[in-house]
Image (cartoon, rainbow, N blue to C red):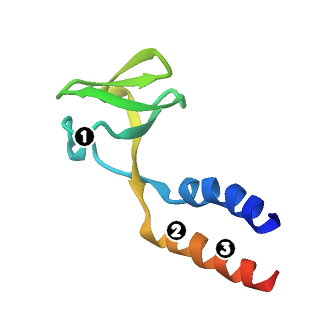
Amino acid sequence: MKKLIILLLFIPLVFQGCFSYKTVNYSQISNDKKQKIIIETIYKENIKGKLISIDEKQITLKKSSELKTVNKEDIRFLSVRKFSISKTAEVVVGGYVNSKKN
């Protein structure tokens, strides 16, 4: 029973650690993929949301139920959420090693 509880607590941590954010250029973002994005503006504002649309002049993200549009010239940094196989492997191997110690 104790191992089952530990396993149930461990599963969300595995999937949380599987992703990281990679800085990309504006031109590298594809409109056909509905990616999760973080934008840092020139005003030091961080906006995190799901991509709704992108064109040559602006990008629109959905944060909760609110749409946020940012002009291209107002973007300082742009990061896209990517699956990280190395982070996933670290978490799985670390969890396995810890379970063997108990």
Whole-percent x and y of residue 5?
Answer: 76, 59
Residue behind mark 2: 87
- Nearer to me, 61 or 8: 8
Asked whether, in this view, residue 52 is left or right of residue 13, the answer is left
Instruction: Compute the Cα span from label 1 to label 3.
Output: 32 Å
Q: Which mark is residue 95?
A: 3
Whole-percent x and y of residue 93?
Answer: 59, 79
Residue behind mark 1: 33
Amino acid carrying mark 1 in the image: Lys
Instruction: Compute the Cα span from label 2 to label 3.
Output: 12 Å
Which residue is located at x 74 percent, y 78 percent?
98
**Sooner in the amino-acid sequence: mark 1 or mark 3:** 1
Asked whether, in this view, residue 83 is left or right of residue 72, the answer is right
The quadrant of the rendering that contains the C terminus is bottom right
**Sooner in the amino-acid sequence: mark 1 or mark 2:** 1
Task: Say above or below: 65 vs 22.
Answer: above
Instruction: Compute the Cα span from label 1 to label 2.
Output: 23 Å
Q: Secondary structure at mark 1?
A: loop
Q: Quadrant of residue 52?
A: top left
The quadrant of the rendering that contains the N terminus is bottom right
Q: Quadrant of residue 96?
A: bottom right
Asked whether, in this view, residue 95 is left or right of residue 31, the answer is right
- Nearer to me, 18 or 23: 18
Which residue is located at x 21 percent, y 24 percent?
57
Q: Secondary structure at mark 2?
A: helix
Amino acid carrying mark 3 in the image: Gly
Q: Secondary structure at mark 3?
A: helix
- Nearer to me, 95 or 87: 95
